[in-house]
Image: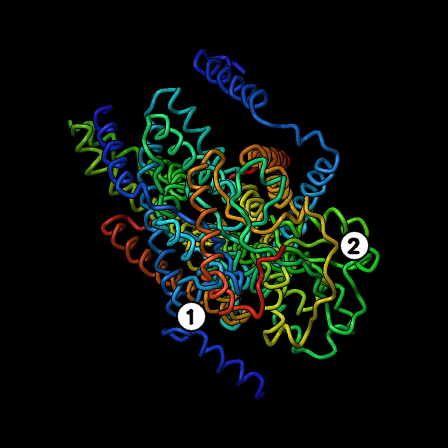
Amino acid sequence: MKKIALAAALALSFGSAALAQQVKVGIAAEPYPPFAAPDASGAYTGWEVDIIGAVCKAAALDCAITPVAWDGIIPALTSGQIDMIMASMSITDERLKTIDFSDKYYNTPTVIVGAKGVQMDATPESLAGKIIGVQVSTIHEAYVQKYFAAGAAEVKTYQTQDEANQDLAAGRIDATQADSVAEQAFLDSEAGKACCEIKGTVADDPEILGKGVGAGLRKGEDELKGKINAAIKQIREDGTYDAITAKYFAMSIYGN
Amino acid sequence: MTAFGALAASSLDLLAYAPPGWGATLLAGLRNSVLIAFGAFGLGLAIGIGGAFGKLYGGPITRDLLAVYTTIVRAVPELVLILFLYYAVTGAVNEALLLWGYERIQISGVAAGIAVLGVVQGAYATEVLRGAILAVPVGQIEAARAMGMPPVLLAWRIVFPLMLANAIPGLANLWLVATKDTALLGVVGFAELTKATQQAASTTKAFFTFLTAAGLLYLALSLLSTVVFHRIEAWARKGQKRTGG
Amino acid sequence: MRDWLQPHRVVLIGLAVALVLACAWFLRWDWLAEPKYQLLIVQGIWRTLWILVVTMVIGMLLAVPLGLAQAAGPWYLAAPARAFCSVIRGTPLLLQLWLLYYGLGSLFPSIPGLRGSVLWPYLRQAWPYAVVALSLSVAGYEGEVMRGAFKGVPHGQLEAAKAMGMPRFAMFRRIWLPQALHRVLPTLGGETVLQLKATPLVSTITIMDTYAVAGRIRQDTFIVYEPLLMLAVVYMAITGLIVLMFRWFESRFPSKSA
């Protein structure tokens, strides 16, 4: 029995040793246009997917894009199911306690989106008494809980930002906080144009909102981190980053 | 009226088989759901046979441990069990491999889904099979023993066919539960019909269309399964006395 | 009591206690001490319980006519009842929940004047949808159970009542319904447990029940297993309570074999 188990483990290890160079890059299974969203054939496309391709090429890694449920993506990384997270995950001190991050590869402001015609801006006073919706397990949820929850009528959490946008269009929530670029995709859609507009940018809090979006890595994977950082630097210097950004956005989203 | 007409027309566009219609994605999700349900049902059946025999004929420790297993699995919601088993099992397997000095392995979504749902199904299958075995008329077993039938032949020729007829309604129910529990796997991120529906609906904002389409697919699956199981039960009950109505 | 003191049981119980103590000692439980999480946990359990009770009651009230229609009704009542039960039992509850909440929600912008209507405060919140979906689900499953129960009441009793000139409604109220409910009582406990296990699904439509609270704790603190363990313990405790409660019910109405 022991021999069989040992043989099986050896066979598995040979199999996986052959794939040892393959890096499983985790992305969120939930759609997050224009960064990563599945199309009808199931393939994921978007700015972030293209950046993953460019970074892996520059680092000479064999990357496999692996969709994982967003609110289980960090446990998936720490338990070894994936090797890297590139899912628009912000670098925050809280997350740094559990995982490591590469250098940032983009940084966009966070906005509050609300119904057209309603007077509202991105301050706790203005949002008092309103119903705010956020995606679960995000920096936006943490921010809303810290700054707006005390005065707000209710904070509702959704599995995807799309569901929150849906409820905003349906009128069930008064406002949602999310990344400006992701929300722009919603506001450009028919439903978004009809119902809602950006109300303002929230006051910055680097501790919660983080210092930009970086690739999540397990602690101790310094070699992989070095490769990824070098690759990010390279694609920024040789113009690949700007070329990919030009396909999706009017201006650079690298931020400062 | 034209609003509904437009809605219907755009719905059919969205559900079309070829991209940009999402019909193929939904069907692929359905295929995954059926595969996972099949595997989980089979695994559950295997665990259930072992569990039923252990509970009926095993020693006291076996019986107690099995009782703990079935009680816990039947008392805790599937969603919690699925989350726990998914992270605990894959984490434990990878830890063990690391301990022996080997690389981590990636357990595919389908395999993990089958393993997790199979463990849950096993607990219910244990109870169904145990009840079915207990419902076999004792007189038949005694008569066979009196005629000197060896135990294995007894199990195969007498207990098994009679038990099968009793077990099939319960197992049919379990199969339906398996097909619907795959939807819970979607919440944890596995690619199956409910997840595909959520993605399609999120991307196209046509929630009503896709949720209804997915519902119809599940309904078709369950109606087909019910018909199949009725025929299986009729076949299993061949030659047995009809119980009074 | 002597059952529990057999040597192998004592050893197993000892092992279980050791396991629980090891979990309590080695795993991270500091989050339980925070008052804000304690409040959330209590609120979550309260929501789980009231949703369970309300939907079981409404569902059973709907299940009785559904079962009766299928057992004894004319074809124009029995067929829709059967169709309803088939649809409810043939599709996942998660899908039914989402269809009601997100599906209907996606139609809201195209209905003018909705926001001014008197229903609007209820359409905005998530709990009405959860109550409706779960109640319909209970009705679908228990309708099937009640059908079997109504059919299972010995026909002779109903015939005797008719022969004695009892009006139909009185026969239903005093003979058929009580006997059917009595037959169903053992299964009802199990069905309530099944409904309890279905309640975590409401967390996907923004209701902060026990499961959603555990999820929130998990991603606030990044702890993976301990909140799930607490979740399992809470649900097992509630299940135990339900089982005990139904056992007490059954002891109050002992079954006399007909």
Instruction: Kindly identify the amino acid type of the residue bearing the numbered disc 2.
Output: Ala
In the picture, residue A53 is in which quadrant? bottom left
Q: In this view, does C183 lie above or below C74?
A: above
Q: How far apart are marks 1 and 2 (CA)?
A: 38 Å
Q: Is residue A185 above or below residue C18?
A: below
Residue B10 rendering spot, x and y as whole percentages: 49, 80
* Residue occupying image coordinates x 56% and y 19%: C21
Q: Which residue of the protein is positioned furthest toward the front in this rendering?
A: A237
As rendered, which of B97 and C191 lies closer to the eye? B97
For disc 1, the neighbor class at 10 Å (few under 14, some 14 to 19, many from 20) is many
Q: Which mark is residue A152?
A: 2
Residue C25 rendering spot, x and y as whole percentages: 58, 20
* Residue occupying image coordinates x 36% and y 43%: B107
Residue on which disc 1 sits: B22
Q: Which residue of the protein is positioned furthest toward the top in this rendering?
A: C7
Asked if labels 2 and 1 touch by Cβ distance under 8 angstroms, the answer is no
Q: Can residue C166 be seen in this view?
A: no
As rendered, which of C150 and A148 lies closer to the eye? A148
Q: How is the image coloured?
A: rainbow
Question: SS at mark 2?
Answer: loop
